Image (tube, rainbow, N blue to C red):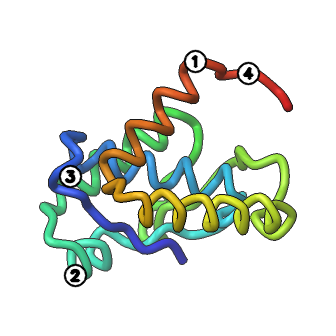
Amino acid sequence: MIEFHLDTRSGLAPYLQIVGQVRQALLLGLLAEGDKLPTVKEVVAKVAINPNTVSKAYRELEHLGLAAAKPGVGTFITRSLGQASLAEHGPLQQELRAWLGRARAAGLTEPGIEAMFQSTFRENPEEES
């Protein structure tokens, strides 16, 4: 089951962070069609967040067609976004971990690493090597 976390420094609304984390988990194959999301009560217990914020995130996931609430049962993923499982991307993930290690050793902070990635991605969003 997915565990949510909030980054108060991100500037992104908490409900959008939850939506983004579900989307990311779907893309990586960590969540699949039929998987149950944590209940609002479970999320509130683990993350300091207002229950209405979690409900808003789940409503947004429903609006996007990614989840559906079943009254009295829970909220379930209704479709997948991933093309391959995370395991299939293991070598890429290892390369990324190595690169992150080099970036940190070079003195880059997390915001600097994120800025570099976003800038590079925007320069060549569909370039293939």
Please determine whether, in this image, residue 91 is positioned above or below residue 54.
below
Question: Nearer the N terminus, badge 2 or badge 1?
Answer: 2
Residue annotated with mark 4: 126
Q: CA distance from mark 2 to mark 1?
A: 41 Å
Residue annotated with mark 3: 53
Frontmost residue, 94 versus 63: 94
Frontmost residue, 48 versus 50: 48
Q: Could you tell me residue 60's position as x and y percent?
A: 39, 39
The structure residue drawn at horizontal position 22% and vertical position 73%, both measured from the top left corner, is 47
| Quadrant of the snapshot with the C terminus | top right
Mark 2 or 1, which is nearer the eye? 1
The structure residue drawn at horizontal position 68% and vertical position 57%, both measured from the top left corner, is 28
Q: CA distance from mark 4 to mark 2?
A: 40 Å
Q: Amino acid at mark 3?
A: Thr
Please give the label number shown on residue 45. Answer: 2
Badge 4 marks a residue whose secondary structure is: loop
Q: Quadrant of residue 43?
A: bottom left
Q: How many marks?
A: 4
Q: CA distance from mark 3 to mark 1?
A: 34 Å
Q: Are marks 4 and 2 in contact (CB under 8 Å)?
A: no
Residue annotated with mark 1: 123
Q: Amino acid at mark 2?
A: Ala
Question: Nearer the N terminus, badge 2 or badge 3?
Answer: 2
User: Badge 2 local density, few (<14 within 10 Å), some, or many (20+)?
Assistant: few
Badge 3 marks a residue whose secondary structure is: helix
Q: CA distance from mark 4 to mark 1?
A: 9 Å
Q: CA distance from mark 2 to mark 3?
A: 13 Å
Please give the label number shown on residue 103. Answer: none
